[in-house]
Amino acid sequence: MSLRKPSKKANLPADAGMTLLELLVVIAVIGILASIAIQQVSLYRARAIDASMRSDLKNAAMAMESYYGEYLEYPNTQAAILLVGYRNTSGVSLTINVTSPSSFTLTAARPNGSQVSFVYDSTTGLIN
């Protein structure tokens, strides 16, 4: 048995804190993870904007057909399809182009999507 008094340094653990290098490594890893997350969030946001444009095109196409069922002609204005139940998503602009008495195209546009706009063609029924 030793009669020496323990010194104050003996009571401290060997790893009392983080070194500057360890702190820099942790900050770098957090920065890399944050940059990956920001890219994914912007990608998901662009997909959501695309989905809203496509949804508006499908709803407008249904409203165009409903209007045709009532009045036997396709409308030229968005105000006309509002009468048969079409509701526009805020931020999405819709353009109606009646190409013939039996066909039309619809264009939906909104900034910050993966595409500037999407087009619905009534002859094919496809959204491009």
Image (cartoon, rainbow, N blue to C red):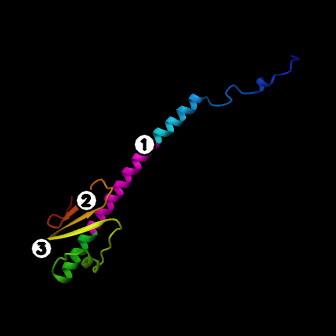
**Structural distance between the alpha carbons of marks 3 and 1:** 49 Å
Q: Position of residue 69 (x, y in %)?
A: 19, 80
Secondary structure under tag 2 reads strand
Please report the residue visible at 34 percent of the width from the left and 65 percent of the height from the top: 91
Location of mark 3 (residue): 102
Q: Vertical placement of 75 versus 111: above or below? A: below
Amino acid type at circle 3 is Ser
Q: Specify whether 11 is left or right of 83.
A: right
Give the magenta-colored segment's residue range: 34-58
Mark with earlier residue (1, 2): 1
Q: Where on the picture, by quarter, is residue 84? A: bottom left
Callout 2 amino acid: Ser
- Read off the residue under disc 1: 36
Q: Quadrant of residue 104?
A: bottom left
* SS for callout 3: loop
The image quadrant that residue 56 belongs to is bottom left
Q: CA distance from mark 3 to mark 2?
A: 23 Å
N-terminal of the two: label 3 or label 1?
1
* Residue nearest the observer in this picture, 2 or 60: 60
